[in-house]
Image: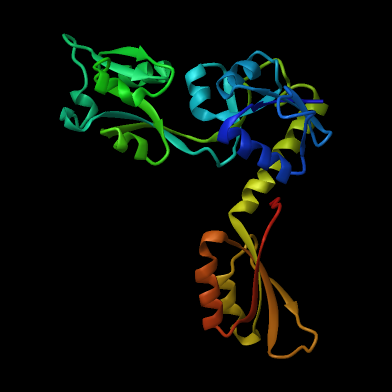
Amino acid sequence: MLRIALPNKGRLSEETRTLFNDAGLEVRSLGDRALTASLGGEFEAIFVRAQDIPEFVADGAADAGVTGWDLVQESQRPIESQLDLGFGSCRIVVAAKDDAGITSIDQIGSVEHPARVATVFPRITRRFFESRGRPIDVVPVSGAAEIAPHLGIADVVVDITSTGSTLRVNGLREIETIMRSSAHLITASNGPSGVTHGDASRVREFEELATALGSVIRARVQRYLMANVPRAALDAVRSVLPGLNGPTVIELANGGAFVAVHAVVRADAVYRTIAQLRALGGEGILVTRIERLVP
């Protein structure tokens, strides 16, 4: 049974549990504080801090894990992403006080006066500023980095943000985005677990896990559309409903002037697709969510 390391708390934990439940791998534990759980009876989950998951996976204590890609990059452990899970989206940015007059990275730090940078991501921060040739002194903090410039303990911050609202509320201006991050399904690079190379049964188990999770992720951004359209307009309908491999065309019982078409369409394009079908004479249009989608 493969062991999967999952975040033990916070929004990342909640969205991970939802994904596994939707994939048919229900998280079954003995209580809210349980450190382990069954995932649909197929896998074992262990619950640890999100920032510790790259270490657990790299060292072989877990065969795979779910955590933020920013935490993987900060760990500097030999980790590979097997699947971008699409939630937990955020950015790591450089920010300075509104009144600091800093508008670019080139204005931060000099050989004579290295900039002090407060961050919870010291490794990512050092790599970034070194790559840009800017001398800095990292000021590690455990949280609330945005207060550091106001207390005079740092000139700028490297912090995580989703919308930038927290930075703006605290009088900080974004200077540059270092990286974008989201939750990923990860494994060790040539590590001891053997779930991507090695024992065939373990490889197969992991592939089944990745397929189950991927099918839910793909389905979330797609919808299944059904409509009755004029037979004479089928060529035009095919251009409106390309679907995965073109729309499925079904004869109606009366064999009349209309046929039924079924197709998978992107959720963010449904409103436009409906309007186009109606313009072609389509009727009886039905749109429904998809639970799984395996191409």
The answer to whether residue 190 is seen in the rendering is no
Residue 69 vs residue 246, the one in the foreground: 69
235 w.r.t. 142: above or below? below
Residue 107 vs residue 152, the one in the foreground: 152
Location of residue 173 in the rendering, given as x and y in whole percent from the top left corner: 26, 34
Q: Viewed as shown, does residue 291 lie left or right of 280?
A: right
Location of residue 142 in the rendering, given as x and y in whole percent from the top left corner: 44, 17
Location of residue 177 in the rendering, given as x and y in whole percent from the top left corner: 34, 33
- Quarter containing the N terminus: top right
Image quarter of residue 226: bottom right
**Which residue, as the protein is rendered here, is positioned at the far top?**
112
Q: Viewed as shown, does residue 149 lie left or right of 13?
A: left
Image quarter of residue 115: top left
The answer to whether residue 69 is seen in the rendering is yes
Q: Viewed as shown, does residue 86 lie left or right of 294?
A: left
Colour scheme employed for the rendering of this structure: rainbow
Which residue corresponds to the image point at 74% horizontal and 36% vertical from the top-left? 209
Which residue corresponds to the image point at 70% horizontal and 78% vertical from the top-left? 260
Which residue corresponds to the image point at 52% horizontal and 69% vertical from the top-left? 271
Location of residue 280 in the rendering, given as x and y in whole percent from the top left corner: 55, 83
Which residue corresponds to the image point at 55% horizontal and 81% vertical from the top-left? 278
88 w.r.t. 263: above or below? above
Image quarter of residue 166: top left
Residue 275 vs residue 45, the one in the foreground: 45
Label tally: 0
